[in-house]
Amino acid sequence: MRKSEYPKTADTLGKRIRKQRMDLKLTLLDVAKHAGITEGYLSRIEADKQVPDFTIVIDIALFLNDDVGLYLKSTLLKIFPVKDNEKFIKSLKNYPPTPFTVSMLALLKNLKA
């Protein structure tokens, strides 16, 4: 998928992280060190030029005392555009119902462009 095809939202993952980080008066280094990533990598995430791994998203959200679900939703929208959700949902249904698959199904079913 080309970058221009990503859903355009006013509250992208990167913008949300940057706003929360700045509201808490934290530096790129503060957040990056906690998440175990470089400042450059975090800067690319904040600029929406990099889609981070889920574990990094969760680490950042928890460190910034923010809603992990909203961060994951933003990340999922970049990875799985709304038009592809049905295909991915069907493939997830082939797996046993684990906490991960149940959570992913719930998140994907609730995504809106």
Image (tube, rainbow, N blue to C red):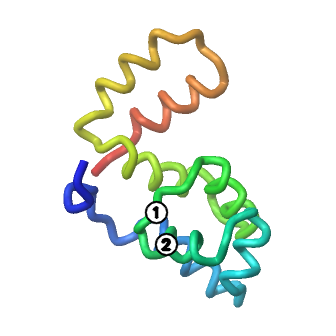
* Residue 23 placement: quadrant: bottom right
**Amino acid type, callout 1:** Gln
**Mark number displayed over residue 7:** none
Placement of 47 over or under 109, stated as above or below = below
Using a 10 Å C-alpha cutoff, classify the residue at mark 2 as few (fewer than 14 neighbours), some (14 to 19) or many (20 or more). Answer: some
Placement of 94 over or under 78, stated as above or below = above
Residue beneath the point at 71% across and 70% down = 64
Placement of 22 over or under 3, stated as above or below = below
Between the C-alphas of marks 2 and 1, the distance is 5 Å
Give whichever of 73, 57 is nearer the camera. 57
In the picture of the structure, the residue carrying the numbered disc 2 is 44
Q: Position of residue 36 (x, y in %)?
A: 75, 63
Residue beneath the point at 32% across and 47% down = 112
Give whichever of 32, 111 is nearer the camera. 32
**Amino acid type, callout 2:** Arg
Q: Are marks 2 and 1 in contact (CB under 8 Å)?
A: yes
Q: Position of residue 67 (x, y in %)?
A: 63, 59
Q: Judge left or right: residue 97 versus residue 24.
A: left
Give whichever of 39, 103 is nearer the camera. 39
Using a 10 Å C-alpha cutoff, classify the residue at mark 1 as few (fewer than 14 neighbours), some (14 to 19) or many (20 or more). Answer: some
Q: Earlier in the sequence, mark 2 or mark 1?
A: 2
* Residue 93 placement: quadrant: top left
In the picture of the structure, the residue carrying the numbered disc 1 is 50
Instruction: Give the total of numbered labels.
Output: 2
Q: Position of residue 54 (x, y in %)?
A: 60, 47
- Residue sticking out furthest to the bottom: 25
Per the image, label 2 sits on a secondary structure element best described as helix
Q: Position of residue 49 (x, y in %)?
A: 41, 67
